[in-house]
Image (cartoon, helix red, strand yellow):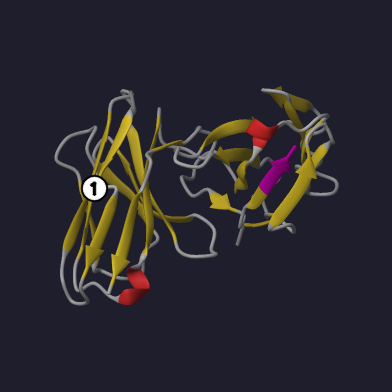
């Protein structure tokens, strides 16, 4: 059974709309992250949370807003969608926050903005 | 800032031949953490190897890598490729433990044929 659930798996949106990407982890981890992978680019760190507290935000745009209602839950709200936002968004978690930690990834949400 | 270079975008091999995927990095920190993540088709990326110890071979699932700080390298090797090794391999770097930012390379796709 997948331990990190991301929903939906595929998402198509129109420019200017708003979408929420869902992520839940059942590993008992204390830290959660969002990464983005655009076409032909490496995985790119976006946000990190530890015990539901925002630790780091490497996303320049305020259109991307993480939301953590529970420790094992980290959604990503994206507003005013643009075609450049088209990417696969990976949620990840680790036992604790820190650079030495192993990241555990979800299967990703592939977003296409038309 | 930190960076990771994977020079090969695609490596094609015949089953049974040795595998070597290159990874070099740049960081100002003296004790970085290096990772190899593997992403099989239709699965989530997952950790294959990690190391922070200079000149120590790390092994898992038939793969091995040695962190060489003198050359800033962490190449991934396997003595004999299998069809099931076909996947996307990411080298990743964390400059220090008190950060959450893991920098990924662009990835190397390994295709193993019969």
**Depth order, front residue of B48/B40:** B40
Residue at numbered disc 1 = A8
Residue at 24 percent of width and 63 percent of height:
A12
**Depth order, front residue of B69/B42:** B42
**Residue B2 spot, x, y in % from top left:** 62, 57
Residue at 25 percent of width and 57 percent of height:
A11
Residue at 54 percent of width and 64 percent of height:
A40
**Residue B24 spot, x, y in % from top left:** 75, 52
Residue B51 in view: no
Instruction: Say left or right for B108 vs A97.
Output: right
Task: Say which element carries label 1.
Answer: loop
Query: In the image, is residue B113 part of the stretch drawn in magenta?
Result: yes
Residue A97, quarter of the rendered image: top left
Q: Residue furthest front?
A: B114
For residue B85, above or below residue B71: above
Numbered range of the magenta stretch: B110-114
**Depth order, front residue of A73/A13:** A13
Query: In the image, is residue B107 part of the stretch drawn in magenta?
Result: no
**Residue A41 spot, x, y in % from top left:** 53, 63
The chain holding disc 1 is A
**Residue B67 spot, x, y in % from top left:** 77, 37
Callout 1: 10 Å neighbours few (<14), some, many (20+)? Answer: some
Rendered-image quadrant of the C terminus of chain B:
top right
For residue A63, above or below residue B29: below
């Amino acid at each position: 059974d997948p331990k990190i659930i991301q929903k939906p798996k595929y998402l198509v949106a129109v420019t200017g709309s708003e979408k929420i990407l869902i992520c839940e982890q059942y590993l008992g981890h204390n830290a959660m992250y969002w990464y983005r992978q655009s076409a032909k680019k490496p995985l790119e760190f976006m946000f990190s949370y530890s015990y539901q507290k925002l630790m780091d935000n490497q996303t320049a745009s305020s259109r991307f807003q993480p939301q953590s209602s529970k420790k094992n839950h980290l959604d990503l709200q994206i507003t005013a969608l643009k075609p450049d936002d088209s990417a696969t968004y990976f949620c990840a978690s680790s036992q604790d926050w820190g650079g030495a930690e192993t990241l555990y990834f979800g299967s990703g949400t592939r977003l296409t903005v038309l | 800032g930190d960076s990771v270079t994977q020079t090969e975008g695609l490596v094609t091999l015949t089953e049974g031949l040795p595998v070597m995927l290159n990874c070099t990095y740049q960081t100002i920190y003296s004790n970085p953490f290096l990772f190899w993540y593997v992403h099989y088709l239709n699965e989530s990326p997952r950790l294959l190897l990690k190391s922070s110890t200079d000149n120590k071979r790390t092994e898992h699932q038939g793969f091995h890598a040695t962190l060489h700080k003198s050359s800033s390298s962490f190449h991934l090797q396997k003595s004999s490729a299998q069809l099931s090794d076909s996947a996307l391999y990411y080298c990743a770097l964390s400059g220090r433990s008190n950060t959450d930012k893991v920098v990924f390379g662009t990835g190397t796709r390994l295709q193993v044929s019969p």
